Amino acid sequence: MLEQIEQRKTKKTEAADELNAMREELIDLANAAKASKLPVIITIDGWSAAGKGSQIAKLIKYMDPRFYDVESIRTPSAEEKRMPWLHRYWRRLPKQGEFLILDGSWYHDTVKPLVYGDIDKDTYKERLDDINVLERQLTDDGYLLIKLFLHITCDEQKKRIERLAANPYTAWRVDEQDFADNKIYDKFFKRYDKTLTRTNTEYAPWHIIPSNDKTTAQFEIMRIVTNAVKGAVTAKAAGTKYAETPEFTPCDVKPEKFRLVKTKKLADTDMDKSLTDKEYGEKLNKYQDRLFELQNICYQRKIPVVICYEGWDAGGKGGNIKRVAAALDPRGYEVKPIAAPEPSELARHYLWRFWNRLEKDGHFTIFDRTWYGRVMVEVLEHLTPETRTEMAYQEINEFEKMLTEWGAVVIKFWINIDKDEQLRRFTERQNTPSKQWKITDEDWRNREKWDEYEKAVDKMIELTSTDFAPWTVIEGNDKKYARVKALKTICRALEERIR
Amino acid sequence: MLEQIEQRKTKKTEAADELNAMREELIDLANAAKASKLPVIITIDGWSAAGKGSQIAKLIKYMDPRFYDVESIRTPSAEEKRMPWLHRYWRRLPKQGEFLILDGSWYHDTVKPLVYGDIDKDTYKERLDDINVLERQLTDDGYLLIKLFLHITCDEQKKRIERLAANPYTAWRVDEQDFADNKIYDKFFKRYDKTLTRTNTEYAPWHIIPSNDKTTAQFEIMRIVTNAVKGAVTAKAAGTKYAETPEFTPCDVKPEKFRLVKTKKLADTDMDKSLTDKEYGEKLNKYQDRLFELQNICYQRKIPVVICYEGWDAGGKGGNIKRVAAALDPRGYEVKPIAAPEPSELARHYLWRFWNRLEKDGHFTIFDRTWYGRVMVEVLEHLTPETRTEMAYQEINEFEKMLTEWGAVVIKFWINIDKDEQLRRFTERQNTPSKQWKITDEDWRNREKWDEYEKAVDKMIELTSTDFAPWTVIEGNDKKYARVKALKTICRALEERIR
């Protein structure tokens, strides 16, 4: 793609009027984006010394600074390195109606680290795949994503680095590495080109900005951004989906087809499994001790562990989690209870709040309810349009795959009880003063929709039981049996991982 | 204080029944704390190898892990070092109804770094003062704070370190430093003792746990925690304030009296100040250019800059901020618009969300509305009891002092317009379709309370114009004048700081 770009000159005086007009328009468009709750992400990548910083300054100069955030992406910090590599981008996701402008984006973590030898080719390729997934997930969720690559020639880059180095006020901005990089411009060229080609998709096409001439770059960026925001605002008002017209033939990226393991319907669960008190005491001790040992190993090897609890109301999730937690060194895990999302969470991609709740590697994150609310309560209560919830199975599989790529063991439990057992427990809660806080009207309402829920759960388990993050249905009528099975399942999964 | 502690032995068998009873009680108490929205912080400090980790594990073993969070405090990371030193603790504040258990707390950043030479004596003393402020602010806000110091003797410490080092499974937990520290046990003893004495206050007294014998320690911790939680839950139900009875004579810490600069009433503001277009153009350019230079210096010297905007509705805050932001490198600042708090924010100390929004050093944080909502809207709309809002002036001065200790330049603007000018702008907004989103019914309602607001603002400015963070009232009837004055004030303050 890069070889098709022709550098050209634009006279400042000639462009001035049109630039001013676009700037005025952009102010109105930013207000319109705010009003129509359109979230916008502009990624600005390109060659060193291509002028990313000053172009961003020009782009936003007249925008209301309350509605945008500019973030500079540098080498990941020690803390960021302990999280999935895309975590630091997810964390920064803008709210609906706001602009996020990334000075160096997720592309920062591809070409440079590869050329410098910080990541190998497989990781590089995996990251390009991850990027395509990320960008599809964001655009499917209504984010407007504008990707800009600032392109300069080898000579121009050399000239700029030398100029920066010669000026005492800017000398600190360049170092040996910049000169060394310029010497292998061709190598970078090939690599950038490949990266651009492989991530130029229908849903997130690239704009390559000829940037030898600053006015040309400024003009092009302004033109592209105003056009895209206008298009997206208009489309949103019309209830349609906006897509930019790619400047280059997009590559054909199909969502990954995940291998699913065979699962059973909930109705086929054997609900009679149970343990005697004696069996329970022995096995509980045994697996808790083993889990403690395994946690220690995970801690030392920096293996992240993500445990997900879902299940019927009154299924016994709380007590089950308690037995798992009791086995663990408390400094090494956190339990995250998931309730209805807050306004700031509703204003972002639904996976945002889960990305945000992950603990660093070596630690356990235990979710008490999870992202699967997307395909249960959000479907049954019609909180989210079906077109979006139908995409969630794929999105969730992709999310969990990224967790496993990060090195995580992902364990998912559905705690199953039958309808009679639930009624028994509801009634007991209702009649026990110290337990009444545990039961709400909503629980009774949900119970009325048992059959619908069961269908949704069957579908969820069928479509998200990947080989890297399979569901375990836990027979929960007997709490003792359920607790031991959860502990045992976790131990098995960790043993498998550390082998 | 430490020399008063007698180590003693408790027989496991004798303590077992009582321990079990307390454990059961603690489960109920945690539920009661949840129900009555009591936030609890338990800090666990003490000697190396005193058994903090295993005591925490014993304490929480039967508690519901969804209601507590255990955090291990280690040496601050590179990112944490770029924030105020208490930032990493504020960030972790628990919600109402939840327990935060700190394995090493803010005390971690006092004795050890002093003995190791990482901080000097003045910093150490300043930190003790900061701690007393923090603990008062938290307890005044209804947090139950339980401070535990695990005390072991020199011989016992030596024995434990040797034992850990000899066991291949635990050897990684000790290093040369631990042995070296044990050799200067006496030095640590004196320093710990001083620290405990200086932070043993009426509102946050210390509990020193004789920990040579683990059962004794376990028993004492359980006893203290259950008593305190019971006391606090009971007091909260009765609408009174709980205070533990100090075991040691508390030191008398008075809130710092801040030197206030003399201020004028809003009514005495000269509202006729204005600039011609020509003056405006020249001065705007001049101060914007200067601000850009100053930002560069702040960035290189890692000076944090915190700019606060308050003012009448339609006072022109947005446009003013825009002119400041336009001068800055967008990678070096963030504008934080402050709206009504979200549920997770309401469930914590009101300053929490502001601590959380600070940018790291070298960067500008620009608040569009601030923590001063506490003494304006929260007073006038009766959102918060007067006893609490009356404390806010002191709390806010303390907060801003911590920011300046961190190295920040704190600049606070009140954009003042008169009542006629506001009416003119409201009407214009109402009549201009593209500006209608800016005006709401709430604005009109607030306008009706103009006189009450004016009184509150006068009081606020009078009581929070400290010499380190004074207010600047900006004459805002003429927007041009207001913008230039803001820019000029910022430049002056930064020049003062970098001299």
Image (cartoon, coloured by chain):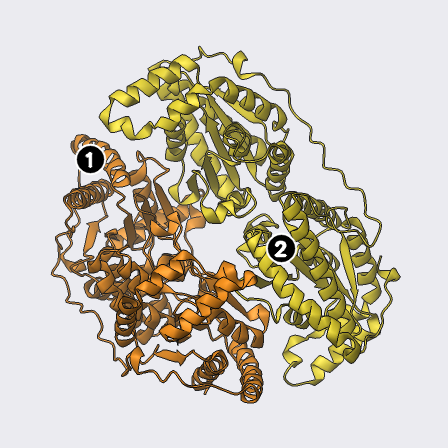
Chain colours: A yellow, B orange
Judging depth in this view, the residue of B8 and A257 nearest the camera is A257
Query: Between marks 1 and 2, how big is the CA–CA gap?
Result: 54 Å
Judging depth in this view, the residue of A28 and A226 nearest the camera is A28
Would residue A298 appear left or right of B442 to someone viewing this image? right
Residue A338 image offset from top left, x and y in percent? 44, 38
In this rendering, the answer to whether A20 lies above or below A499 is below
Residue A107 image offset from top left, x and y in percent? 69, 56
Q: Going 58% across and 50% down the picture, which residue do you hit? A: A90
Instruction: Check disc 1 and report the residue beneath it.
Output: B22
Residue B101 image offset from top left, x and y in percent? 32, 47
Which image quadrant is residue B10 in?
A: top left
Name the amino acid, label 1. Met
Would residue B196 appear left or right of A123 to someone viewing this image? left
Residue A93 visible in rendering = no
Instruction: Check disc 2 and report the residue beneath it.
Output: A40
Q: Are marks 1 and 2 on the same chain?
A: no
Q: Chain of mark 1?
A: B
Q: Chain of mark 2?
A: A
